[in-house]
């Protein structure tokens, strides 16, 4: 399994949304600024997340996005799968046709790894991540940075 930026950005954006949408809907522009992700890329990801029933758009002034379910009901594996990322470590996509239409010598090894990764990511919900101290610290820092964007550019870290 190779997690691409699509999967990483989707999880990051969903965690940002889970954190900030507790108060009001969150715009993709705000997520893009806080997480330094391209707005057009977020639009593509959120179209997929919306089709997967994970987020919903809220129209009008003060609109943006909210989670469709509780943060405790959305796990990391679901997010990655929703944006068409694979949690499969085999080169055959789990089809067992990796060597001349039959399984290769290490097929079971990579299937086992895939299962471990999937189980691990299924066991972590957005709510679990929100409870982590480091997530709280980073989210608060990002919020403060958004409140004082001029200072960020005057005093680069």
Image: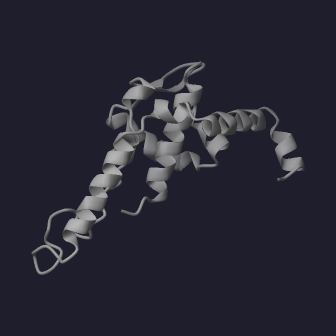
Q: Is residue 108 left or right of residue 31?
A: left
From this view, report whether residue 139 is shown above or below residue 36.
above
Q: Is residue 23 left or right of residue 1?
A: right
- Of residue 80 and residue 61, the one placed in the foreground of this image is 80
Q: Residue at x 15, y 79 (%)?
A: 99
- Of residue 116 and residue 6, the one placed in the foreground of this image is 116
Residue farthest toward the bottom in the current orientation of the protein: 100
Which quadrant of the view contains residue 3?
Answer: bottom left
Q: Position of residue 147 (x, y in %)?
A: 78, 32
Q: Is residue 46 left or right of residue 81?
A: right
Image quarter (top left, top right, bottom left or bottom right) of the N terminus: bottom left
Using the rendered image of the protein, determine whether residue 56 is visible from the camera's viewpoint: no
Q: Residue at x 39, y 42 (%)?
A: 79
- Of residue 39 and residue 70, the one placed in the foreground of this image is 70
Visual colour scheme: one colour
Using the rendered image of the protein, determine whether residue 136 is visible from the camera's viewpoint: yes
Which quadrant of the view contains residue 108?
Answer: bottom left
Q: Position of residue 24 (x, y in %)?
A: 58, 19
From this view, report whether residue 151 is shown above or below residue 61.
below
Q: How many marks?
A: 0
Q: Residue at x 27, y 54 (%)?
A: 115
- Of residue 14 and residue 131, the one placed in the foreground of this image is 131
Q: Is residue 97 left or right of residue 23?
A: left
Q: Position of residue 13 (x, y in %)?
A: 53, 41
Which quadrant of the view contains residue 51?
Answer: top left
From this view, report whether residue 145 is shown above or below residue 154.
above
């Amino acid at each position: 399994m190779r997690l691409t930026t699509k999967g990483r950005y989707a999880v990051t954006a969903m965690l940002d949304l889970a954190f900030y949408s507790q108060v009001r809907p969150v715009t993709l522009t705000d997520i893009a600024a806080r997480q330094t992700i391209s707005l057009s890329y977020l639009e593509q990801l959120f179209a997929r997340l919306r089709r997967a029933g994970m987020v919903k758009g809220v129209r009008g002034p003060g609109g943006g996005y909210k989670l469709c379910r509780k943060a405790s009901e959305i796990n990391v594996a679901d997010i990655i799968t929703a944006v068409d990322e694979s949690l499969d470590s085999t080169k055959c996509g789990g089809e067992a046709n990796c060597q001349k239409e039959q399984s290769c010598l290490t097929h079971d090894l990579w299937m086992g790894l895939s299962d471990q990764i999937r189980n691990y990511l299924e066991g972590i919900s957005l709510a679990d991540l929100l409870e982590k101290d480091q997530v709280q610290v980073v989210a608060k820092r990002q919020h403060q940075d958004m409140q004082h964007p001029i200072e960020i550019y005057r005093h680069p870290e």
